[in-house]
Image (tube, coloured by chain):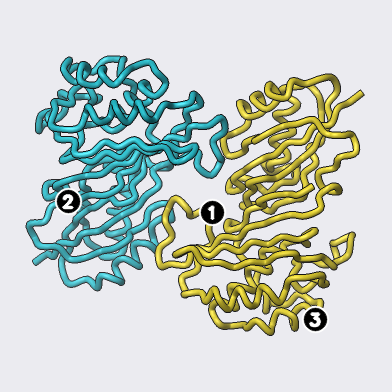
Chain colours: A yellow, B cyan
């Protein structure tokens, strides 16, 4: 008889080849599984709510895993944090119903994309912000963002639409662009995101911000349902998986 | 005929053996001097306002150096930032009077020490905060800090008082302790600081915060003029050289 656990996890993706286990590279999932085995003596797959790419961060990734026996939750959390490197932290662990699934049970996800829009990027933010020197017009970016909200085929904003087994239609509930001084924050909420979709949306919005594309281009690009070089993929280090809703 | 320049510099000290040039290790001064030579073909000593230790950061370190010929300031700044790693940034460069000296002309310096006072330290702050799990009493810490303000012999709060060629008396203008949620910030301003003095003050204040020492212990420790194990040196990663006043 195994019990299911849910963990809320933060990580700095700088030194990892993304979330998903790879045979030759260090990944967040791989590290957590390795440490979990070290603590419990059991082999468990740590199922995340979704993958994140190399250098992408998470403030609130959620993952579930099954373990035999009864674990003391605080001991499990303390043990994981003691053995993991400080760039991965388990914020909380709780027991879950056996039908809970970190990916399938998620009803909404929030990503945040952070742009530093100034001549100099502070050293302390170098791994956590995309640096854009040209002054971005955040008002026009926000206009362009609003025209992408809703249920659409986002194939043109995905890196590899043919890979998506659940199709390429997703609903975007929220896509906000706001400036906070030298920083621009993009907040994206949706019922799911295609591969590299947030970075493609951010790449598109940056093009709008520097005046190379306009708000009307968003719906036109959606209509093509084809990814082209018109939409660049913004750098990974500005991206955070912020919150998963269940 | 050489001209003197002043640079304002930020750096993340995590990957450096401190400010000062060392033959075998990578240092901030060493990197800037190397890149300066690469750009100008000239060898110049980059005189900082003071040293910082390994893993200590700077938001506003100030340094001066002399170069022959007339340099375009914006080109010099852009060139330095292009060749330096992104964990060192030159925020500004201006020309200085020939009698300006980054260390000797400084009239006041400000350091800030950041403590993360919660069970979990976010991965993104791991190199920029000292992590203290025990709940710190910031009100008592602030009281203890106020009793250290003024002109004193700070030998008991220095790592190596015999090394100080200008003696061990310094004036502390300001020593503030404030809590901002899970974070505690110590701001220290003085006319100069002894070797490891801010980290020793922070180490003392942390002992007060956890109740091992009290506000009355500060003046008593000062009076001993001797460094003992009663005052621990707080970790380097919480410390920032914040601003140098001229």
Q: Residue at x 49, y 37 (%)?
A: B182
Left or right placement of residue A206 versus residue B224 in this view: right
Q: Secondary structure at mark 2?
A: loop
Q: Secondary structure at mark 3?
A: helix
Give the CA separation, mark 2 to mark 3. 59 Å
Q: Are marks 3 and 1 in contact (CB under 8 Å)?
A: no
Q: Which residue is mark 1?
A: A128
Q: Tell which of B46 and B227 is nearer to you.
A: B227
In this rendering, the answer to whether B41 lies above or below B116 is below
Q: Residue at x 33, y 47 (%)?
A: B58
Pinpoint residue B1: horizontal percent, then vertical percent: 8, 67
Q: Chain of mark 1?
A: A
Q: Residue at x 14, y 47 (%)?
A: B107
Numbered mark located on residue A224 in the image: 3
Say if residue B24 shows up in the picture: no
In this rendering, the answer to whether A165 lies above or below A227 is above
Give the CA separation, mark 3 to mark 1. 32 Å
In this rendering, the answer to whether A203 lies above or below B4 is below
Q: Earlier in the sequence, mark 3 or mark 1?
A: 1
User: For mark 1, does the 10 Å Cα neighbourhood hold few (<14), some (14 to 19), or many (20 or more) residues?
Assistant: many
User: For mark 2, does the 10 Å Cα neighbourhood hold few (<14), some (14 to 19), or many (20 or more) residues?
Assistant: many
Q: Chain of mark 2?
A: B
The quarter holding residue A158 reads bottom right
Numbered mark located on residue B102 in the image: 2
Quarter of the image where the N terminus of chain A is located: top right
User: For mark 3, does the 10 Å Cα neighbourhood hold few (<14), some (14 to 19), or many (20 or more) residues?
Assistant: few
């Amino acid at each position: 008889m195994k019990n299911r656990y849910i963990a809320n996890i933060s990580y700095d993706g700088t030194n990892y080849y993304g979330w998903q286990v790879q045979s030759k590279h260090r990944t967040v999932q791989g590290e957590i599984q390795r440490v979990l085995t070290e603590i419990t003596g059991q082999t468990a797959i740590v199922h995340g709510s979704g993958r994140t790419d190399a250098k992408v961060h998470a403030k609130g990734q959620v993952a579930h895993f099954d373990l035999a026996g009864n674990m003391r939750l605080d001991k499990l959390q303390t043990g994981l944090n003691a053995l993991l490197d400080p760039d991965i932290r388990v914020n909380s662990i709780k027991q879950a119903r056996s039908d809970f699934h970190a990916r399938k049970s998620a009803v909404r996800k929030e990503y945040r994309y952070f742009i530093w829009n100034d001549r100099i990027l502070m050293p302390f933010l170098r791994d956590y912000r995309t640096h854009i020197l040209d002054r971005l017009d955040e008002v026009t970016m926000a206009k362009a963002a609003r025209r992408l909200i809703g249920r659409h085929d986002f194939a043109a904003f995905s890196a590899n639409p043919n890979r998506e087994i659940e199709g390429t239609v997703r609903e975007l509930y929220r896509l906000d662009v706001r400036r906070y001084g030298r920083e621009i924050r993009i907040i994206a909420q949706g019922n799911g995101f295609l591969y590299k979709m947030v970075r493609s949306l951010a790449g598109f919005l940056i093009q709008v911000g520097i005046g190379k594309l306009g708000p009307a281009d968003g719906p036109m690009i959606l209509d093509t349902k084809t990814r082209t070089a018109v939409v660049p993929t913004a750098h990974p280090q500005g991206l955070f998986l912020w919150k998963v809703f269940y």
